[in-house]
Image: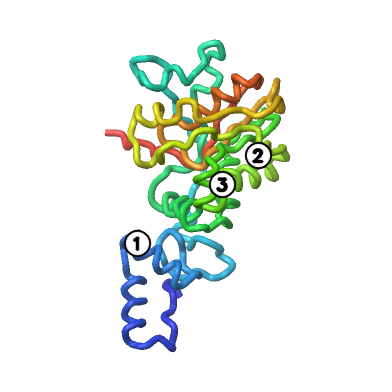
């Protein structure tokens, strides 16, 4: 069976509604199907057996984790708003972000379900992908924090869940309170380009001295421009960390060659 079975007790109106959802090619339709029929693939909405967890075999095959690198802005000509977020005295130590998945298609559906629809069990899937791209020489993992207001709205910090799973995989401690988001910022998803860098200026502050002389692995769920990770890394380095490596589960898709 490749598609979610329609319940036999469903009357004509409900039956038609479920069939419509089953055949939907839109993200809204797939999201509604996943809600009505929990055993459907997050990526495409088709029926899956309980042992297959969150993705059907086809979508799982496209969910391929491969080490990838995104370079961050490093000069005025590349990003006027972002230059001051990269402390010059630390050289090039965090001018790139490692990530494992292209943020498109099935990956985007998984991240959105995890981040916005309370599918916290997806933390294991995303952390296993992130681990593929993670550097080996680190002492402690620090997740990107949410502002208290955003955390109350969402109910959890999705990046902390990834970091905790990653810590278990890498046998590293997770310093969940080492970094605070001291300023509420507009959602980065609503901004483009340099506005994302300007939006995160002064948003983070390190707490205490637990990161002094430590090799920190700073973790986020998705990297788009690197603005959030850059601002957080600056705060960590200013607090005395030895070095900072930047890691995300997903990031920009590779551009097709022309």
x%, y% of residue 77?
33, 15
Residue at screen point 56% across, 39% down: 145
Residue at screen point 55% across, 55% down: 122
x%, y% of residue 111?
47, 50
Q: In this image, 246 relative to 77: left or right?
A: right
Query: Which residue is identified by label 3?
Result: 157
Q: Is residue 66 visible?
A: no
Query: Which residue is identified by label 1?
Result: 28
User: For residue 210, what is the image quadrant?
Assistant: top right
Q: Is the C terminus in the top left, top right, bottom left or bottom right quadrant?
A: top left
Give the CA distance from mark 3 to mark 1.
24 Å
Give the CA distance from mark 2 to mark 1.
34 Å
Q: Residues within 10 Å of mark 1 (few under 14, many from 20)?
A: few
Q: Of label 2 and label 3, which has the lower sequence position?
A: 3
Q: Nearer the viewer, residue 157 or 23?
A: 157
Give the CA distance from mark 2 to mark 3.
10 Å
Query: Which residue is identified by label 2?
Result: 176
Q: Nearer the viewer, residue 233 or 204?
A: 204
User: For residue 43, what is the image quadrant?
Assistant: bottom left
Name the disc covering residue 87, or none: none
User: Can you say whether 91 is above or below 172 in the image?
Assistant: above
Labels 2 and 1 touching (C-beta < 8 A): no
Q: The residue tagged with tag 2: helix, strand or loop?
A: loop
Q: Residues within 10 Å of mark 2 (few under 14, many from 20)?
A: some
User: Can you say whether 122 is above or below 248 in the image?
Assistant: below
x%, y% of residue 238?
59, 19
């Amino acid at each position: 069976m490749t598609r979610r079975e329609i319940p036999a007790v469903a009357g004509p109106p409900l039956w038609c509604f479920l069939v419509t959802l089953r055949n939907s090619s839109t993200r809204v339709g797939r999201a509604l199907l996943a809600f009505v029929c929990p055993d459907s693939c997050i990526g495409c909405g088709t029926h899956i057996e309980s042992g297959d967890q969150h993705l059907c075999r086809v979508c799982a095959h496209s969910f391929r984790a491969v080490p990838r690198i995104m370079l961050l802005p490093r000069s005025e000509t590349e990003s006027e708003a972002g230059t001051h977020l990269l402390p010059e005295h630390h050289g090039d130590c965090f001018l790139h972000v490692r990530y494992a998945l292209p943020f498109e298609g099935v990956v985007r559906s998984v991240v959105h379900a995890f981040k916005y629809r309370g599918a916290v069990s997806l933390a294991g899937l995303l952390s296993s992908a992130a681990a593929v791209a993670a550097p080996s020489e680190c002492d402690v993992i620090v997740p990107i924090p949410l502002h208290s207001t955003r955390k109350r709205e969402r109910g959890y910090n999705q990046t902390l869940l990834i970091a905790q799973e990653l810590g278990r995989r890498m046998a590293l401690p997770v310093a969940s309170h080492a970094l605070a988001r001291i300023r509420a910022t507009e959602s980065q998803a609503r901004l483009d380009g340099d506005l994302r860098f300007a939006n995160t200026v002064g948003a983070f502050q390190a707490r205490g001295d637990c990161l002094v002389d430590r090799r920190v692995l700073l973790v986020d769920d998705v990297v788009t421009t690197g603005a959030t990770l850059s601002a957080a890394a600056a705060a960590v380095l200013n607090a005395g960390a030895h070095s900072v490596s930047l890691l995300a589960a997903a990031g920009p898709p590779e551009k097709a060659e022309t």
